[in-house]
Structures are given as structure tokens and as C-alpha cells.
Image (cartoon, rainbow, N blue to C red):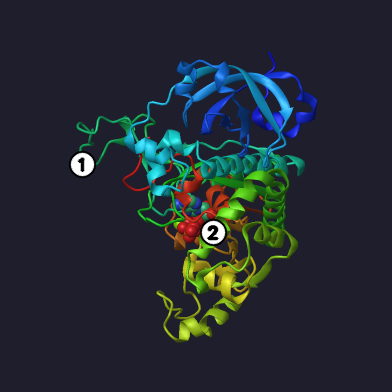
Amino acid sequence: MEKQTIKDILEGYKKYLHHDITVQGWVRAFRSNRFIALNDGSSILNLQVVVDFEKFDEEILKHIKTASSLRITGEVVESQGAGQSVEIIARKIQILGENFADELEKTVLQPKKHSLEVLRDQAHLRFRTNLFGAVFRVRSKVSFAIHQFFNQNQFYYINTPVITGADAEGAGEMFQVTNFDLNHIPHTEDGAIDYEQDFFGRKTNLTVSGQLEAETAAMGLGRVYTFGPTFRAENSNTTRHLAEFWMVEPEVAFNNLEDNIDLAENFLKYVIGYVLENCKDDLAFLDKRFAEEQKTKPERERAKEGLIEKLENVIKKRFMRVSYSEALEILMNSKENKKGKFQFPIEGWGTDLQSEHERYLVEKHFESPVVLFDYPKEIKAFYMRLNEDQKTVAAMDVLFPGIGEIIGGSQREERLEVLQQKMQEMHVDERELWWYMDTRKFGSVPHAGFGLGLERLILFVTGMTNIRDVIPFPRTPKNAEF
Ligand code: ATP
Ligand code: MG
């Protein structure tokens, strides 16, 4: 039997008119013992099923409650009521799963707004709400669009390891991986932990970035990208950081910084355009929610544009491209800085930018996405290419309104000697990265790449504010229950 989803039926109903079809889904509401709003997850829209209660057993009607699951066979007819073009006249109703909700669940299931925090603890119900249904459908479409963009541009998708011996940044924010019995850790004679006896015969951790591995792949395949889970044990409880998040990392041989910025801009615009085109119903819902949320905020904190409007504007305008030095001037001379309104005052050239500074530039000063480039070498990673001024590196960050940094990338240092010098200065052990150094010894070429945090992009396109609400199972400090 061909199974139609509710999306199929609503979109192609003419084809089904006056035919009997079978649908399955969960009850969103049952009004007047007559109208079932049925949802199967395929769309944010519900299908209306009309029940003539005189034709059905008490026993069955009794179990049609919000959240119970049904299989219904009936005729597709044009709807008399407002709000939908089509409905089903039920002939046969089968209860698949009753609703055994306890008191808490009952309140969560009521068709009213729930706190997003409460829903985070109710994994099964979360996926049933309009809001999270929309968010996760959009998330899925975004992932598809990402693969589509790269595939269309002749990139190869490569999978870099989740367990790795390399630390991309030397930042010490890693989760260690071991199969030692933690109560009996073997030690060497001088008292150090004997990693030779550990599973991999060395110290290993969960990856913080696939970049170094992706660089080795780009040196043979030309254009590659990774798209996988990334782990950071950063104890920062912010609305923009997760301990486990998904990162997209293109790496391209023969690209310089400008090519890299162009790639980032085209990529973001493609994905956002794809969502505008392919997630209309969900975006309409999210747009409305966003507007309602703005009303609850004090006037000066309200967004100037609606959600859809914001997305449309982002793909129309060229991103601002501003060097770190120019940005620093702007920040130093800003009223905010002079009046001491920044939590981290701008002290002079070389200051690392905090998210409050990034957001000032994007939201107040430029009112546009901004790409910052050419950062002081001291505040960026060792592999970024040293510029001719010897003071800055060819780094770039893409900053988005409401989010701050969404992409971080750079042209990589392809010159072996310069790289070695940089590593020495920054105390990165060349011997640990011997396999990476090899890429600079056998036909090294200029190349560049960046990392996009998937969840930050989802925050932007859905208008959600907390990163925990755009990933199905958030991992944050003290939180990994399910
Ligand atoms: P931030 O300054 O916001 O911590 P970062 O400089 O540590 O970011 P990168 O190491 O450049 O970030 O990582 C590339 C991208 O990955 C970032 O631009 C961001 O979109 C995303 N990202 C980084 N850390 C996290 C995190 N903990 N949770 C979710 N996304 C993250
Ligand atoms: Mg960070």
C-alpha cells in the first residue's frame, strides 16, 4: 500500500478528491466530538478529519484525545469550513496508541505556550510541538542544502575522525577518550599515566575540529568539506555554546582569503535562500512566533525586521568586509566604549573582540552581516597565514546579527618555514603534528577554509534565541541525561 503523508494530501489534494485514503498521525485536538486535527510530522499543518460520532463506537471515541495516535481511513472531500481546503470523512478509525499522560505531561500537551525549558526535559513531547517540529524540519532542510551547495560546486564530502590524537588549537577544551578502568589507571615508573597501555596506545580526545585532517584531504582532492559532530568541553554556559555541536568545514586548495570570504558569503546565502524557498509553512509559523516574542521585549531590544524579512535582506545585500584594524577604530571611538558601556573595554590594537563588540558592529554600526579579516596574529591560531605586515594573519570571521560569530576561518600558512616559526612561538609541538607538517613538504599550495557552527545558523534562520533549542538532544555542562 502506498502511504500518503499529510503533506502529500494537503499539497496534492486534487488527485485524492473523492477517493478513500488512509492516514496515520497524532491527535493535536478533538473539537466538539467531531473534528480531529491530525498531524504526522510531515508538515506543520494539520489535516482535519470529520467524525460522525453516531457511526462510531463509544469505546473508540473515548480514546480520541490529544496526543493519542490513530490510523484513519476515509474519503477526501473539499472542506466546507474555513482554514483548510480539504478534509477527510472518517469511515474507519483505529486507535494505535492511547494517551496515558501523567499530570505534567497533560499540562505540557495543552494547546498553549510552554516554557522551552520544560520541553527540553520532555524529549518525546518536544518533537510534537509546532515550534520544535518547525525547528527540526528546518534543521533537516538546512543540512540537505549544505550538502547540495557543496555537491553543486564540486566539493567532496569527507569524514574526519571523531576520536583523534590531534588538538587543532591547543586550547585544552577537549573531552578525553579512554578505556582505562578509572579506578586502576596504569602508571609508568616515574608516576606518569601510562598512555601506552590505553586503547590507542596514546592519549586521545574527541575532535574539536576536523580542519587539520581536512587540510590533508584538500591537498589531494582539491575541494573538500566535513560535516560532523564536534566537541568542546568549554564550561561556558551561554546561549551560543554547546558541548556537542555540528560543524561544517570546507577546505579548498588554491584559495586565498578573498576566495574564502566569497565562498562563505555565497554558501550562507545559498542555504538561507534554500530555506526561504523550501520551508515556507514552517517559516511562516516561526515568523509569527518571532513577531510575538518581540512584543514582549522592551522597545529598544526589539528586532527592526521580521524573521522572513531579515532572511530576505541578508541574501540581497553584499556582506560588509572590514579589517580588524578598521573595526577596532570604530569600536574605540564608539559612544559605548567611551562611556564604559562595554563589559570588556577596548584597550587598543591587539584586543580580542568579545561577542558584545561583534554585535555592536553588526547590529548598531553596520546593520548588516560583517566579515572581519586580518586579525592580530597573537589572538588567532598557529595555522593562519602570516600577512606581509608580520603583525596580522589572514583570518576571517563572519558575524551575524543576533548571533555574533557564525563562521571562523582563514587562509592557511602553506610555507613550511613560516609555519614552523609560528608553531615555535605559540608552543605547538611540531612532532605531535608530523603528519600535518608533511602537507607542507610535498607540493604545498595556498589554501583556505572555514568552520560554520550548524546550530548558530539554525538559530539565525529560525529566530530562536537559545542554542539548546535548535539541537534535538543538547549537551551542555551538567546536562547529558538523554
Ligand atoms: P566563539 O568565539 O563563539 O567561542 P570560536 O572562535 O571558538 O567561537 P571556532 O573555533 O572558530 O569558534 O569554530 C568555528 C565555528 O563553530 C564558530 O564560528 C561557531 O559558529 C561554531 N562554534 C564554536 N564553538 C561552538 C560551541 N561551543 N557551540 C556551538 N557552536 C560553536
Ligand atoms: Mg570558542
Q: Quadrant of residue 395?
A: bottom right
Residue type of the residue flagged with mark 2: Glu
Residue 304: x %, y % from top left: 61, 69
Look at 31% across and 45% down and name the residue there: 478
Pointer 2 residue: 292
Residue 85: x %, y % from top left: 72, 36
Look at 64% across and 72% down and name the residue there: 322
Residue 22: x %, y % from top left: 65, 19
Image vertical order of residue 103 relative to residue 99, above or below:
below
305 to the left or right of 482: right
Relative depth, front residue between 205 and 249: 249
Look at 45% across and 63% down and name the residue there: 425
Pointer 1 residue: 190
Q: Quadrant of ligand 2?
A: bottom left
Tag 2's secondary structure?
helix
User: In 3D space, how far apart are the residues under numbered discs 1 and 2 (Cα atoms)?
Assistant: 64 Å
9 to the left or right of 196: right
Look at 32% across and 35% down and name the residue there: 103
84 to the left or right of 234: right
281 to the left or right of 133: right
Relative depth, front residue between 180 and 440: 180
Residue type of the residue flagged with mark 1: Asp
Relative depth, front residue between 410 and 367: 367
Quadrant position of the C terminus in the picture: top left
